[in-house]
Image (cartoon, rainbow, N blue to C red):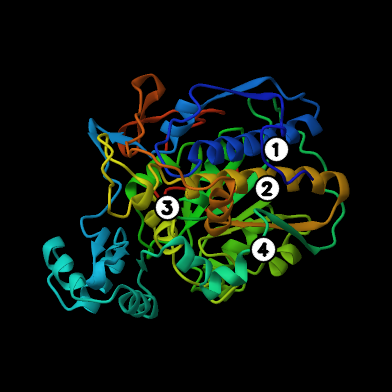
Amino acid sequence: MDLTIGESTFEHIGTVGPANVAASAFDVDGLLVDTARFAVGSIDGCGNQRGTPPPVRTIDREHLLAYCTTYVDLDGAEVPAWADLSGVYPTVGGRHLQVHCNFPHHAAGVVARLGCAADRASVASAIAERDAFELEAELIDDGMVGAAVRTLDEWDAHPHAVATHTLPLMSVDTIGDADPLPLDAAVHSADRPLAGLRVLDCSRVLAGPVAGQALAGFGADVLRVGADHLPSVEVGVISTGFGKRNTSLDLRTDAGRAAMAALIAEADVWIDAYRPGALASHGFTPERVAEIRPGIVVVQVCAFDQVGPWAGRRGFDSIVQSTTGIRWAGGEHGRHADGRPIGTPTGLPVQALDYATGFLAAGLAAQLVAHQRAAGGSWVGRTSLLRARDHLAARRAPATFTPASVTVDAKYLGSVESDFGRVTAVKPFAGTWPAPPERLGTSAPTWR
């Protein structure tokens, strides 16, 4: 297995377009191009193993960055990406704190902790009187999602950074013995090298769903598993739902766990993208899954990784940016067009950590499937938003830049009728839209 990314990897995939599409202190373009090439090249490797030589491909950087904006238009109106209370707020001492309130219960928890009214002005006023680090700790203890905006140096000294800084971008471990599974006889092609591959996608926001959609876009049968009692974000469901079927299971019940085990027993890939330990608490550890389905490939994705004092911390792309110094560095190195310092924390122009991690997870799945078919075994691959962040920070030192949004050119958009209505979104930069996105819970918990 070649778990490396970079221009020397997968030379059948070229790139076109300007080198600096994303305005950022960091090499966002390079991170996304390299991880996208890793995903597509690894998927092509599965096709090659089945007798379909990898085709010559080209990734358009502008198209890729547009894809990573999560742009969705529903019946002529853009679907918002953020809830009203989500954002970065000033605190005492000239510091800042971010709260992530896209899930209603997270918004309610933040408001309850602050003891204020549930409107943005009241939340801002309450946070302005608090110490960023104390409030962060309280929100984490509450099970909410908040992050003090740290400097790069402050993050480097944090115990969780110390515990995780030597982790590789991706890691692989064996979780059981198994004979090589037979190569699937489903009809496949250069456009559908993963035809016949069954992927159980246990994910919500955003990296895990990106991985599942990448696999669906190249022919895999992807069944997304959620639960009716868990919240979702519409823009994420739609933008990452093309080609997936969606089912709901309640793993708190015997019936739900039995249905989950039955799906795993016939799956080739299991994407575990919930918080570390969430699915394990219902009996579905990687090792147990390998017992149910010898030869399975497990890909685990999370925010702050599987190890360290914050391994179980709730997190999203923007929260990782704030926690680990990325947002602070954006404000420190950002300049207005006239050269004046930006002076306020400034995040990446797209959720690059989510998309890069999703691409890495898709590539891991494909490479491990190919390896399993050749050598046997049951395998688990791991990556995280934190590992993607560390890789991004290590690519080069932060540079001066002028913040700007990534432009979504109309030529990259496509429209399709769906259960949601007329959906317009950025077409895949590689692969296809096999089918429109479906509403959650609309499919039976069975394989085709």
Real-space Cα separation, disc 2 to disc 3, in angstroms: 27 Å
Q: Residue 322 lies in what quarter of the image?
A: bottom left
Residue at the spot 65% in from the left edge and 69% down from the top edge: 285
Residue 209 or residue 326, whichever sits in front: 326
Task: Determine crowd level at label 1: few under 14, some 14-19, many 20+ residues with C-alpha closer than 10 A.
Answer: many
Q: Which residue is mark 3?
A: 441
Q: Which residue is mark 2?
A: 364
Secondary element type, mark 2:
helix
Q: Which numbered disc, 2 or 3, marks the residue closer to the eye?
A: 2
Q: Position of residue 434 (x, y in %)?
A: 52, 30
Sequence-earlier tag: 2 or 3: 2
Mark 3 and mark 1 in contact? Answer it, CB < 8 Å: no
Task: Determine crowd level at label 4: few under 14, some 14-19, many 20+ residues with C-alpha closer than 10 A.
Answer: few
Secondary element type, mark 4:
loop
Mark 1 and mark 2 in contact? Answer it, CB < 8 Å: yes
Say whether residue 369 is left or right of residue 151: right
Say whether residue 353 is left or right of residue 350: right
Q: Which residue is mark 1?
A: 42
**Which amino acid type corresponds to the residue marked 3 in the rendered image?**
Gly
Residue at the spot 36% in from the left edge and 56% down from the top edge: 232
**Which amino acid type corresponds to the residue marked 4 in the rendered image?**
Thr
Residue at the spot 26% in from the left edge and 44% down from the top edge: 80
Real-space Cα separation, disc 4 to disc 1, in angstroms: 24 Å
Residue 163 or residue 319, whichever sits in front: 163
